[in-house]
Amino acid sequence: MLDAVVVGAGPNGLTAAVELARRGFSVAVFEAKDTVGGGARTEELTLPGFRHDPCSAAHPLGINSPVFRTMPLDRYGLQWLQPQLPMAHPFTDGSAAVLSRSVAETAASFGPRDAGAYRRLIEPFVGKWDTLLQDFMALPSTALPRDPVTLARFGLAGLAPSTWLMRRFRDERARALFSGLVAHVIAPLGGIATGAVGMVFALAAHARGWPVARGGSQSISDALTAYLKDLGGAVHTDYEVKRLDDLPPARAYIFDTSPTALARIAGLGRSYEGYRYGASVFKIDYALDGPVPWTAKEAREAGTVQVGGSSAEIGAALHAASRENRAPDPPFLITVQPSLVDPSRAPAGKQVFWAYGHVPNGWDGDLTDAIERQLERFAPGFRDRVLARATAGPPEMAARNANYVGGDIACGAASGLQLLLRPKPSLFPYGTAHPAVFLCSSATPPGPGVHGMSGHNAAKAVWRRLRAV
């Protein structure tokens, strides 16, 4: 009998398996797709030689992940590549605000009226980032805070809605960039703790940047898989699990799946009927005949570019997709240009690039024209660079990854109390009504992102139970 079986080979499932295997437990992973990866995959979606990331591509939380930093993933091929700027937020006048590795450079891009306000907000936490992140990404039930005073100070600033926090900024440049940071979790700007979301992304950039993985996000998943196999773990692909009886006997079962799928497979009935799925995205992967012709020079140097004219425009786009059940026009876009720093992703002189805008859960329309009109506002001539495009709306996103219910790439709405208490209010969110069944996906704290911490936290709950038994 195995000690643990993991269902789903996304970053959290693989991390949970590694954490158990390196503590001496026997582990096997079962994945329905023919490759590992979940939200961290790389495929040729457009033309031969153009390697795209179907979902996550830039990894501020990956390089900063407390659990990834304890693993020798570099020995298994994972290499982080840093663009000259982590992120840029261009404006229609050709200027841009930036999120730089330097707090001072970032503050200066906001202008003199907001530079001091940004530094006062961020600088108290920069020197304590590693401890703060570890405390922020764990739970009191899994680990006591290492620096409760700093965590409390962070909470005082971050638990407020981002709209409150942004009142300290007087000009639009800072407000727009910070609004875009919050939008990465597809949350309305006025929700509880959205201030913390923006602060975490900013601090992550100042600490270690917003890199891409050489060769694509698949490199993260492949490194975790190789490490797991060296530890004695097994990985089985093309193995769809429809019920617990499909799996070999084990002392614990850990699901890197949506709560909906877990309840269905494990026979937990209506355990998660109150769990909410959020807005989705419409994503376009591009093969380009050269770099994106951004008007702002800073955007030509940034790995990630946020595309939204103002904080009001960004807020309206999020509200339309999340609350009004309609596709926004203009949409707010998150874009990534990996081949700026990784030439292996495209043929010589060419580029891979992706952009997504937010749309309602399950929306089946086509946002291509609205996305490209928005890109043309900030990069005139963009359409002339397009060699091929691959589009994916909510139905296609859900087909690629069963965890994206209705196309929700966060595996559950990251808004309201569900941003903090997921999948339901509990001090033990990784456990279920079945004593041997656990949940480790992005539906559990600390939530979305390629960081593995949900897998780590769930594995800790599992190994405590296995040792107790």
Image (cartoon, rainbow, N blue to C red):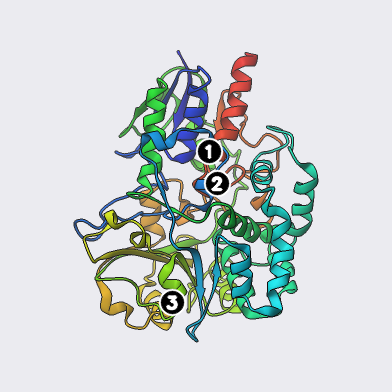
Residue 24 position (above or below residue 173)? above
In percent of width and height, residue 15 lies at: 49, 34
> Where is mark 3, residue-wise?
297
Q: Are marks 3 and 1 in contact (CB under 8 Å)?
A: no
In percent of width and height, residue 320 lies at: 55, 72
Residue at position x 62%, y 75% in the image: 110
Which quadrant of the view contains residue 232?
A: top left
In percent of width and height, residue 284 lies at: 35, 65
> Where is mark 2, residue-wise?
64
The kind of residue on which mark 1 rests is Arg
The kind of residue on which mark 2 rests is Asn
Which quadrant of the view contains residue 156?
A: bottom right
Closer to the chain start, of discs 3 and 2, is 2
In percent of width and height, residue 151 lies at: 75, 47
Residue at position x 41%, y 55% in the image: 57
Residues 79 and 59: in front is 79
The quarter of the picture where the N terminus appears is: top left
The kind of residue on which mark 3 rests is Lys
Q: Which numbered mark, 3 or 2, is in the foreground of this view?
A: 3
Q: Secondary structure at mark 2?
A: helix
Residues 334 and 364: in front is 334
Residue 69 tag number: 1
The alpha-carbon separation of the residues under discs 1 and 2 comes to 7 Å
The alpha-carbon separation of the residues under discs 3 and 1 comes to 33 Å
Q: Secondary structure at mark 3?
A: helix
The alpha-carbon separation of the residues under discs 3 and 2 comes to 27 Å
Q: Are marks 1 and 2 in contact (CB under 8 Å)?
A: yes
Q: Residues within 10 Å of mark 1 (few under 14, many from 20)?
A: few
Can residue 384 be seen here? The reply is: yes
In the picture as drawn, the residue positioned furthest to the left comes out as 48
Closer to the chain start, of discs 3 and 1, is 1
Residue 22 position (above or below residue 323)? above
